[in-house]
Amino acid sequence: MNPNQELAGKVVLVTGGAQGVGRGISQRFMDAGATVVVCGRKTPASLPQSDGRSAQFHTCDVVDTDATAALVAAIVADHGRLDVLVNNAGGTPFAYASDGSPRFHQSILRLNLMAPLTLAIQANAVMQQQAEGGVIEFIGSVAATRAQPGTATYAAAKAGILSLTSSLAIEWAPKVRVVAVSPGLVETEQSALHYGDAAGIAAVAATIPAQRLAQPQDIGDACVFLAGPRASYVSGTSLLVHGGGERPGFLTAANVNQG
């Protein structure tokens, strides 16, 4: 098998797969030979391409249960199967918890926790009927296991994603593997909203052992690995993709051992 085409013949759905981290994930799956379907609320200006092939796009709001059910049904009708689901769509604006209304917090939980769970359940129903089963991947975040002032509800949702990953891996085994990929800081077209201008991004990158933010394709590489045959015994766990983590603040603040 050509290692660059290890997912040839597989059908992959990447939510939010036309921009940001999702686009990098879609691109890497296409490079691995998979047929990739992406969805979003708005038609994108362009779609990921590989070897003359283009990702397929469906308009879908992932918080709409009926819409996601119709999306899964359409994929099965078009391709006869669904092998991999990458629950990528999500996000949050910056807002301190005390400044957000109950409706605001509910919307963050709905997008980042309930919608991925619902779509996973719908995809699992298809995969359980397939001879080869399938793989469900949740895109988590390092925010799940650290203090996250300004995005506390998002972080709580991502912590929930890690819990779902371990529980669903047991419930849906052995036909369906369930895994999570937990990125650290990723450079996308929206990085300025989180880190500021180029100087701000560079300063943030300097806190990471790898001395750079992740690129969307870095996350895609992890997703392709976990979906492929070389990870056939990996389930119920999360892969950290964070460049070594972040330098502890006390090391910078201390006035000793700075050599």
Image (cartoon, rainbow, N blue to C red):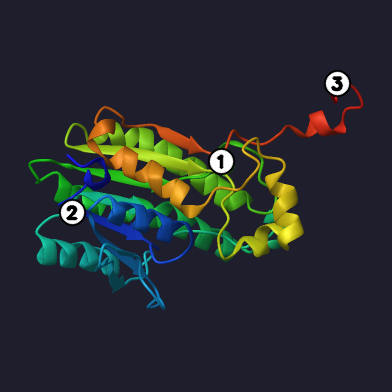
N-term mark: 1 or 3: 1
N-term mark: 1 or 2: 2
> Is residue 183 something that shows in the picture?
yes
Residue drawn at point x = 23 percent, y = 54 percent: 34
- Position of residue 158 relative to residue 48, above or below, is above
| Badge nearest the viewer, 1 or 3 | 3
N-term mark: 3 or 2: 2
Residue drawn at point x = 39 percent, y = 74 percent: 41
- Residue type marked 2: Leu
Label 2 sits on a secondary structure element that is loop
Q: How many marks?
A: 3
Q: Residue furthest top?
A: 257
User: Could you say which disc has been placed on residue 257 in the image?
Assistant: 3
Which part of the image, by quadrant, shows the N terminus?
Answer: top left
Q: Quadrant of residue 101?
A: bottom right
Label 1 sits on a secondary structure element that is helix
Residue 227 position in % (x across, y down) = 28, 42
Q: CA distance from mark 3 to mark 2?
A: 54 Å
Residue drawn at point x = 48 percent, y = 41 percent: 182
Q: Which residue is mark 1?
A: 142
- Position of residue 259 relative to residue 186, above or below, is above
Q: Quadrant of residue 48?
A: bottom left
Label 3 sits on a secondary structure element that is loop
| Badge nearest the viewer, 3 or 2 | 3
Quick one: label 2, few (<14), some, or many (20+) residues within 10 Å?
A: many
